[in-house]
Amino acid sequence: MHPMLNVAVKAARAAGKIINRAELDLDQVKIGVKGPNDFVTETDQAAESVIIDVLKQAFPDHAILAEESGASGKSDYEWVIDPIDGTANFIHGYPHYAISIALRVHGHVQQAVVYNPATNDLFTASKGEGAFLNNRRIRVSKRSKPNEFLVGFAFPSGQNEGSLGVKRKMLALTESTAGIRKSGSAVLDLAYVACGRLDGYMCFGLKPWDLATGVLLVSEAGGLITDPQGNDTYMETGNAVAGNPKALQYLLSFK
């Protein structure tokens, strides 16, 4: 395992211990609201703090971009952190959430860790070295027919015209595929594409910390990721389509 990836795994597991302790008594967790269906807890903040502490001990000169505390430092090496992707799931005791830690070098993701402390599933990837689930190499699925595709979906909250159009697309996809899954955790959805649990994924309005790890996991597992127009602006727009090659082709053609 790459030394930088090894430190990121250490940070994720340290944060996982905090999250697992909090999960034992969710009624005591203090919850705040950042926006419609957008929650933050003291556990998010504590987990993020310990991740940053571990990373800074090893790499004091690296920059940080974290969901709760924002950006700090300037460096060609930048850690992108989401301490709990799927906070709404976490506060309901629904065990589908994950810690996401990615390292960008000159703007390109080189290392990725996605860790679900509730299930102890650990997804990792290093650029050019493949993607792994619990140290076993993973690949995207081989399914090739639309009626076989299980597709993850994510879109922002609200009832504006854009989000309604996205919801209509999701409803139409429900009728033409094996099913749609809106899990509440973008990083896990992308990790599931990487290991073949999902065949494809569509998302709209996400943030860099929602996408950074998934970009590397999917590509290192033999999948593809673009924006809905087939271009590479997904990190800027937050709109992305991912999947095995056949699933991606279908999702891009779906209007």
Image (spheres, rainbow, N blue to C red):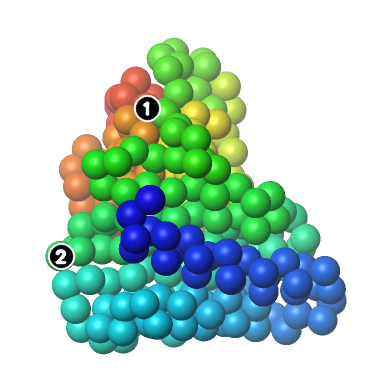
* Mark 2 neighbour class, 10 Å CA radius: few under 14, some 14 to 19, many 20 or more: few
- Labels 2 and 1: the sequence-earlier one: 2
Callout 2 amino acid: His
Q: Residue at x 27, y 78 (%)?
A: 62
* Amino acid type, label 1: Asn
Residue drawn where x is 50% and y is 41% of the image: 135
x then y, percent, for residue 121: 60, 47
* Residue designated by label 1: 244
Q: Nearer the viewer, residue 34 or 116?
A: 116
Q: Position of residue 162 (x, y in %)?
A: 40, 54
- Residue at which label 2 appears: 106
Badge 2 element: loop
Q: Position of residue 229 (x, y in %)?
A: 23, 40
Which of the two residues, 65 or 165, is positioned nearer the viewer here?
Answer: 65
Residue at 67%, 69% (x, y): give it. 17
Q: Is residue 215 left or right of residue 195?
A: left
Compare residues 196 and 14 and report the one nearer the observer: 14
